Image (cartoon, rainbow, N blue to C red):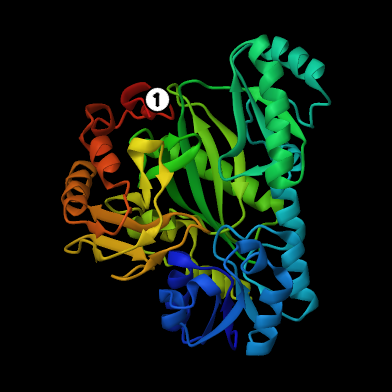
């Protein structure tokens, strides 16, 4: 087992990893920017190291500072959380060259997963269904128009190096595609440093289903059911639940087996997520794989009783999975909402500030993952997530009622600070969502968001 783990992240995921380390009996090291000197993950960790000023590029994304902190602290492993350096194969290589274990998949696997062209080729070879589209980058707007003419509109243009819902745009006509192609390329270059894009058929009405997988270095892999992430704004997930109201046991088994086929084809090791689109006829298509722990991992933990972060650590240390597929039993229903410091009435604009009041719910079946306490500062430099509220109950109606109750107990106040709580209450009260019939167009179609 590892002597000491450095947590190369901040916020609630850093707190989550520190707690997993504590339960495994492994000392943890927090890193922090100047803005996070008094943050909760710093307080909870066994040690902390300052790694730079507030801007992420000079602290949490600055690889020399992070690796140097690990070496100075004597850490022999680094957990990257999600975001920041979590899917950076170069960072994983630098860790290895300094004798530090990167808690995540091998660099070559991250390379294969991060490049959508290689991922699509590998998944096709593994037998997974993919939406019709180009396997490689589209060379120019003329080729994009030719491809779209064969596929039929609407089509979606996606960054080959994209992820997290970014670098995606839909075109519903040839005139629109010419503009979308150029803007998506520019966005991909600015965000990912890679302007390559591809084109595929767009499903206007679909559900976003993702399968949680765990794999070790000994050839073992299991899936832990699905999460339905169909409530989205601009391809960003806002509410997640498990199991999906759209899947029966047979379809769940089919999509789970497909996820395992893809996982094994990649030679994957660690916790990962295979993402699919599902239509109303029960047909599903592979979209991408996320080679890290997901923001919404607590939803799966609540229904299957497996600590995914601890499993990540154990697998990275070389331990074989103790789980077999027959051991995975989904129980009850879980729902997660992301409470962000954002104003839904102003296009979800961030609302940084200092929390003068911060009270979150408790009671049966309620879990809160957060890094905030009264007096915490919400810096403008980072993601606006302040808490994840997760509930569990025996069935979906009871889980939705419990979430509605829990949201009513949230009290977050601060000068200029607004949260997404009222938005989540609107969604939970909507008859389409309560019926289990929400698709990826739910917000634009029913709430005009």
Neighbour class for label 1 at 10 Å: few (<14), some, many (≥20)? few
At a point 24% along the width and 43% down the height, the residue shown is 396
Does residue 149 sit above or below 289 in this rendering?
above
Q: Position of residue 135 (x, y in %)?
A: 76, 30
Query: Dot 1 corresponds to which residue?
Result: 444
Residue 310 visible, this orientation: no
Residue in front for this viewpoint, 32 or 281: 32
Q: Position of residue 93 (x, y in %)?
A: 77, 68
User: For this view, does 327 lie left or right of residue 265?
Assistant: left
Residue placed furthest toward the right: 139
Horizontal arrangement in the rendering, residue 371 relative to residue 31 (left or right): left
Residue at horizontal 26 percent and vertical 55 percent from the top: 391
The quarter holding residue 321 reads bottom right
Q: Quadrant of residue 71?
A: bottom right
Give the left or right position of residue 66, taking residue 228 as reference. Answer: right
Q: Is residue 404 shown above or below 131?
A: below
Q: Position of residue 428 (x, y in %)?
A: 24, 38
Q: Residue 155 placed where, x, y %?
A: 62, 19
Residue 172 visible to an observer of this rendering:
yes
Look at 31% across and 56% down and name the residue there: 389
């Amino acid at each position: 087992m590892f002597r000491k783990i450095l947590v190369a992240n901040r916020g609630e995921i850093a707190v989550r990893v520190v707690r997993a380390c504590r339960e495994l009996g492994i000392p943890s090291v927090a890193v922090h920017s100047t803005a996070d000197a008094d943050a909760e993950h710093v307080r909870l960790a066994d040690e902390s190291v300052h790694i730079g000023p507030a801007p992420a590029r000079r602290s949490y994304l600055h690889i020399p500072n992070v690796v140097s902190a690990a070496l100075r602290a004597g850490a022999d492993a680094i957990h990257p959380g999600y975001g920041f350096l979590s899917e950076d194969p170069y960072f994983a290589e630098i860790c290895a060259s300094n004798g530090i274990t990167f808690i995540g998949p091998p660099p070559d696997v991250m390379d294969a997963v991060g490049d959508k062209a290689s991922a699509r080729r590998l998944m096709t070879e593994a037998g997974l269904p993919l939406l019709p589209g180009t396997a490689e980058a589209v060379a120019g707007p003329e080729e994009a128009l030719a491809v779209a003419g064969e596929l039929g509109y609407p089509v979606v243009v996606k960054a080959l190096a994209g992820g997290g819902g970014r670098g995606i745009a839909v075109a519903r006509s040839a005139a629109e595609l010419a503009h979308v192609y150029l803007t998506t390329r520019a966005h991909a270059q600015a965000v990912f440093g890679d302007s390559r894009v591809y084109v595929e058929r767009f499903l206007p009405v679909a559900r976003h289903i993702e399968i949680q997988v765990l794999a070790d270095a000994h050839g073992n892999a299991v899936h832990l059911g699905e999460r339905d992430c169909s409530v989205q704004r601009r391809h960003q997930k806002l509410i997640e639940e498990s199991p999906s109201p759209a899947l029966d046991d047979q379809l769940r088994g089919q999509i789970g087996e497909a996820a395992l086929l893809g996982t094994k084809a990649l030679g994957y090791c660690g916790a990962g997520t295979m993402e699919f689109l599902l239509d109303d006829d029960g047909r599903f298509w592979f979209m991408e794989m996320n080679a890290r722990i997901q923001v919404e991992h607590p939803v799966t933990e609540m229904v299957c009783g497996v600590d995914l972060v601890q499993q990540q650590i154990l697998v990275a240390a070389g331990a074989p999975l103790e789980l077999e597929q027959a051991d995975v039993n989904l129980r009850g229903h879980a729902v997660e909402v992301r409470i962000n410091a954002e104003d839904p009435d102003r296009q979800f604009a961030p609302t940084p500030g200092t929390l003068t009041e911060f009270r979150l719910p408790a009671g049966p079946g309620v879990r809160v993952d957060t890094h905030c306490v009264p007096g915490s500062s919400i810096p403008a430099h980072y993601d606006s997530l302040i808490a994840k509220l997760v509930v569990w109950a025996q069935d979906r109606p009871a889980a939705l009622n419990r979430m509605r109750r829990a949201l009513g107990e949230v009290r977050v106040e601060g000068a200029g600070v607004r949260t997404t709580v009222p938005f989540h209450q609107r969604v939970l009260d909507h008859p389409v969502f309560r019926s289990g019939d929400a698709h990826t167009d739910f917000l634009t179609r029913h709430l005009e968001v």
